[in-house]
Image (cartoon, rainbow, N blue to C red):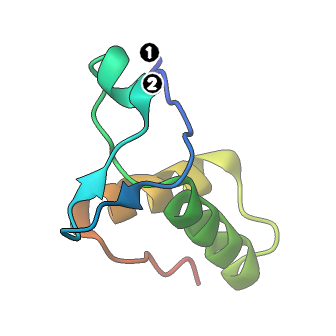
Amino acid sequence: MGINVFVIETVGFDDGDNEVYPANVKANNLELGYSRDHFQDVVDLAFKQKPNALAHEVVRALSHYAEHDDFLDLY
């Protein structure tokens, strides 16, 4: 089973403080789970908490963040 994940540039904001998604997100009818910055924050924290974290643990941390908007503790 696989899933395609696209990491995009950071979401911007217009003068009304509304999110402005990159053109490739709109053009490909994609949904934004979280930005590149959040993705990196989750991965960095996972390896800070558990330097030898396995790929499935990092994926679990990313999934947890996407669902709960909260970091998963990997201790």
Mark 2 / mark 1, whichever is N-terminal: 1
Q: Residue 16 versus residue 4: which sits nearer the camera?
A: 16
Instruction: Tell me if 5 is positioned left or right of 48 in this view.
Output: left
Mark 1 Cα-neighbour bin, 10 Å: few <14, some 14–19, many ≥20: few
Choose mark 2 or mark 1, whichever is in front.
2
Left or right: 54, with 24 as reference point: right
Q: Residue at x 64, y 78 (%)?
A: 45
Q: Is residue 70 above or below residue 60?
A: below
**Residue at far front of view:** 15
The amino acid pointed to by label 2 is Asn
Relative to 16, 42 lies left or right: right
Q: Nearer the viewer, residue 35 or 4?
A: 35
- Image x and y of residue 27, in percent: 35, 16
Identify the element where label 1 is drawn: loop
Residue positioned 56% across, 54% down in the render: 36
Numbered marks: total: 2
Q: Quadrant of residue 66 in the image?
A: bottom left
Report the disc number at residue 1: 1
For image coordinates 33% across by 47% down, the residue present is 33
Tell me if residue 53 comes above or below residue 21 in the rendering.
below
Find the residue positioned furthest to the right: 52
Disc 2 target residue:
24
**x and y percentages locating residue 73 in the rendered image:** 49, 81
Tell me residue 21's x, y (percent): 35, 43
Q: Residue type at mark 1?
A: Met
The picture places residue 56, in percent across and down from the top left corner, at 58, 47
